[in-house]
Image (cartoon, rainbow, N blue to C red):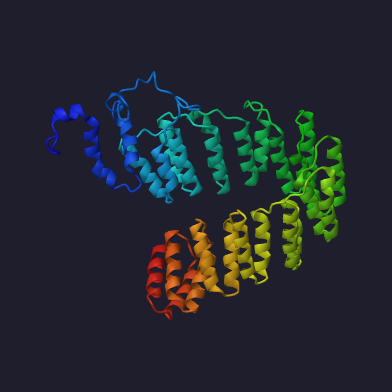
């Protein structure tokens, strides 16, 4: 106490001021911890009686205070750590923030843990995820099933099936009750990772595990057999659904219709459409889109278009997915201008184009060497309130590089990075090579630095191409490439 110029008496009178004085030098080193956050953290450290008077009008008794309408006595206070995790982009920084808050005495709860786990899983930092899961288990934090469903899905996307299965099996150790939703999630992960027989076995054991399979469970298995071309086996699963009194849904029928259409058997698919209608299962826009795709594959564009306009008379309004089928077929046949006319037709019919609708046009315009027109579409969709996704920017960047308009490509890259999307490694290299070829050294160095910031891994052959281009360049491009290549390899 003497070392910091504070007496024991002053500590007893105002412990909060003393702790602020002690912690403040450490807190300054954490860029993300604001003063308000620090106060919130300290509320976990100091007994309630020492700070409960702060901000309170002593002249008013709690009993006489008027609570606003709709307010709740138990309304949760904003969590400063959760806000900090959402703000940072680097998963390592988020992890450091977690431990720094813990050292400051902050008691992490479920919202804190879940925010961090979601961040780490999206960045595919699964070793860190396991580390945080251990902390959750040690601290006996009660978790929601949604957290584990998301994690199982993330494991499935990167083919870590064993980890996904193990997590499903261990969910109960996190004070979390497994339901049919998580069961169906692990079924889907198994099917999508070519472990259909394991999924079938799991479905057979479902009743012993306390689950009663629903239409989603059977739909997942049917999807797996249809992807393998096993029509008869899929039909057996359909029959099993009926035996167990599980009602097929529109999704069930759509799986069967889609398979038949891809095989060119549109007539049989149309019969299935009539059958589902008689059984009280009304087709949706996706059902008609599958039938339209089947007709387009047979070269029957006009019939597909007629079906789209007829579906409204059958009680189903055409959606963006239906127009998208026709636009894709026109694009494949090289008549993109007609596809653009369909976009206008959508708007006239009060059918709002989605990002997929625009991406279809962007894709084919860029393939035809018309990226400037594609860029106008990007501006148009933003004006109409449709946010381009990563695929939009990637197709456009490739389109500009294809016609060797690297200045235009750089413009797209800047917009892309602003929206926090990331190009592919090949697109980065192609853009850098083009900028170096045009003598635009500063912009080439900027792009390479952005690659390094995002830890983009590049094949050795690509580095060699860039190095050859940089050898004839000025402005230190070769030095930068050498430094980055040493970091890479």
Residue at image position (66%, 55%) is 356
Residue 284 visible in this rendered orientation of the protein: yes
Q: Position of residue 233 (x, y in %)?
A: 77, 41
Splitting the image into 4 quarters, where does residue 253 fall? top right
Question: Is residue 305 positioned above or below 375 on the image?
Answer: above
**Nearer to me, 343 or 95:** 343
Question: Is residue 50 positioned above or below 448 on the image?
Answer: above
Q: Position of residue 152 (x, y in %)?
A: 55, 40
Question: Left or right of 305: which side holds 9?
Answer: left
Q: Position of residue 482 (x, y in %)?
A: 39, 71
**Nearer to me, 13 or 148:** 13
**Nearer to me, 273 or 32:** 32
**Nearer to me, 68 or 234:** 68
The N terminus - image quarter: top left
Name the residue furthest front. Answer: 59
Question: Left or right of 188: which side holds 242?
Answer: right
Q: Position of residue 320 (x, y in %)?
A: 72, 52
Residue 164 visible in this rendered orientation of the protein: no
Residue at image position (66%, 27%) is 207
Name the residue furthest top. Answer: 63
Question: Is residue 102 positioned above or below 265 on the image?
Answer: above
The C terminus - image quarter: bottom left
Question: Left or right of 255: which side holds 169?
Answer: left
Name the residue furthest left. Answer: 2
Residue at image position (19%, 27%) is 13
Number of numbered discs visible in the structure rendering: 0
Question: Left or right of 477: which side holds 24?
Answer: left
């Amino acid at each position: 106490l003497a070392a910091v110029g504070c007496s024991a008496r002053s500590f007893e009178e105002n412990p909060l001021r003393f702790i602020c004085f002690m912690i403040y030098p450490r807190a300054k080193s954490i860029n993300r911890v604001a003063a308000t956050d620090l106060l919130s953290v300290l509320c976990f450290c100091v007994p309630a009686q020492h700070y409960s008077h702060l901000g309170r009008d002593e002249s008013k008794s709690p009993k006489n205070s008027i609570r606003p309408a709709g307010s709740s006595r138990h309304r949760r206070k904003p969590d400063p750590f959760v806000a900090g995790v959402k703000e940072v982009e680097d998963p390592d920084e988020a992890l450091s923030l977690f431990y720094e808050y813990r050292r400051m005495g902050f008691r992490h709860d479920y919202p804190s843990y879940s925010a961090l786990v979601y961040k780490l899983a999206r960045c595919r930092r699964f070793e860190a995820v396991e580390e945080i899961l251990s902390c959750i288990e040690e601290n006996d934090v009660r978790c929601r099933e949604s957290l584990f469903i998301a994690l199982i899905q993330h494991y499935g996307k990167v083919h870590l099936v064993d980890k996904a299965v193990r997590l499903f099996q261990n969910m109960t150790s996190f004070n979390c009750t497994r339901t049919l939703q998580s069961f169906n999630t692990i079924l889907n992960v198994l099917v999508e990772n070519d472990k259909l027989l394991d999924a079938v076995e799991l479905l057979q054991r479902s009743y012993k595990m306390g689950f009663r399979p629903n239409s989603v469970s059977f739909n997942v298995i049917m999807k797996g057999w249809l992807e393998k071309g096993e029509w008869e086996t899929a039909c057996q699963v359909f029959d099993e659904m009926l035996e167990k009194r599980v009602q097929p849904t529109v999704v069930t029928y759509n799986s069967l219709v889609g398979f038949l259409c891809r095989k060119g058997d549109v007539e049989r698919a149309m019969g299935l459409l009539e059958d589902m209608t008689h059984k009280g299962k009304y087709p949706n826009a996706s059902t008609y889109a599958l039938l339209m795709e089947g007709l387009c594959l047979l070269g029957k564009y006009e019939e597909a278009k007629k079906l789209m306009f007829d579906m409204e008379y059958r009680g189903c309004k055409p959606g963006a997915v239906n127009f998208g089928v026709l636009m894709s077929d026109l694009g494949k046949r090289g008549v993109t201008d007609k596809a653009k006319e369909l976009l206008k037709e959508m708007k006239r019919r009060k059918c709002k184009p989605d990002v997929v609708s625009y991406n279809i046009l962007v894709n084919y315009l860029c393939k035809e060497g018309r990226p400037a027109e594609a860029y106008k579409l990007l501006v148009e969709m933003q004006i109409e309130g449709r946010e381009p996704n990563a695929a939009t920017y990637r197709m456009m960047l490739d389109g500009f590089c294809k016609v060797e308009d690297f200045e235009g490509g750089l413009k797209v890259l800047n917009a892309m990075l602003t929206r926090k999307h990331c190009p592919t490694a090949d697109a980065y290299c192609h853009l850098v090579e083009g900028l170096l070829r045009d003598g635009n050294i500063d912009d080439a160095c900027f792009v390479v630095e952005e690659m390094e910031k995002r830890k983009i891994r590049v094949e050795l052959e690509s580095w060699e191409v860039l190095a050859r281009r940089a050898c004839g360049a000025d402005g230190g491009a070769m030095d930068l490439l050498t430094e980055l290549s040493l970091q890479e390899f």
